[in-house]
Image (spheres, rainbow, N blue to C red):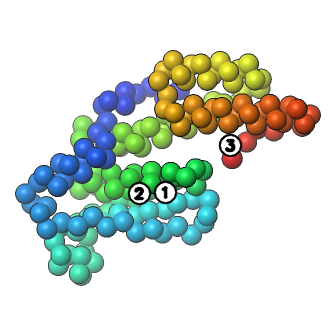
């Protein structure tokens, strides 16, 4: 499991507050563009323009890109937030660590779910759930682990073997 402290990472909201508090950004614009071409994956670009003239001539100061598997109703929002955070980091608002807290939460979420995919018994999944809960994993992670357990039990009931997937 990845070892890092989420409190070491600035949130995108914190970066946005710093950006808008900066007197140099009073005429700035943050524009997000959806580049999604496949229903399974959101792709968002964020462009930061420092002036209306920059936007009119499409000369962003910086950009940021993010992608997110279309796995739940909030995937698009997470993708847009990550894209904004990356654009701000690519400019001068990276905080004490370049990735945003939201990006590192995604790493933590994927770590728990990848571990679940490698397990072979319902007992192992229950133990992993207990570990995740004890480590204050997000509600999203805990729900994802419950989903693995439910699919595992359903595949066992059908006699199809493990058959657990991440979808």
Residue extending farthest bottom: 57
Residue marked by disc 1: 76
Percent position of residue 137, x then y: 49, 28
* Closest to the observer, 145 or 60: 145
* Residue topped by disc 2: 80
* Residue 56 visible from this viewpoint: yes
**Residue 112 marker:** none
Where residue 166 is drawn, which disc sits there?
3
The residue carrying pointer 1 sits among few (fewer than 14), some (14 to 19) or many (20 or more) residues within 10 Å by Cα, namely many
Count the marks: 3
Q: Helix, strand or loop at disc 2? A: helix
> Residue shown at 57%/31% (left/top)?
142
- Between marks 1 and 3 in the image, the one whose residue lies nearer the viewer: 1
CA distance for labels 1 and 3: 18 Å
Who's the residue at 48% across and 21% down the image?
Answer: 135
Count residues near mark 3 (Cα–Cα under 10 Å), then give few for <14, some for 14-19, many for 20+: few
């Amino acid at each position: 499991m990845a070892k890092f402290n989420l409190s070491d990472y600035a949130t995108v909201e914190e970066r946005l507050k710093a950006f808008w508090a900066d007197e140099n950004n009073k005429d700035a614009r943050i524009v997000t563009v959806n580049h999604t071409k496949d229903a399974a994956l959101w792709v968002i670009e964020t462009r930061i323009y420092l002036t209306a003239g920059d936007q009119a001539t499409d000369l962003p100061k910086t950009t940021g890109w993010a992608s997110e598997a279309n796995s739940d109703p909030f995937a698009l929002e997470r993708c847009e937030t990550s894209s904004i955070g990356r654009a701000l980091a690519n400019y001068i608002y990276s905080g004490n660590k370049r990735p945003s807290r939201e990006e590192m939460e995604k790493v933590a979420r994927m770590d728990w779910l990848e571990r679940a995919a490698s397990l072979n018994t319902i007992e192992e999944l229950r133990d992993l759930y207990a570990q995740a809960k004890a480590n204050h994993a997000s509600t999203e992670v805990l729900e994802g682990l419950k989903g693995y357990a439910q699919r595992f039990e359903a595949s066992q009931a059908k006699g199809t073997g493990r058959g657990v997937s991440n979808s």
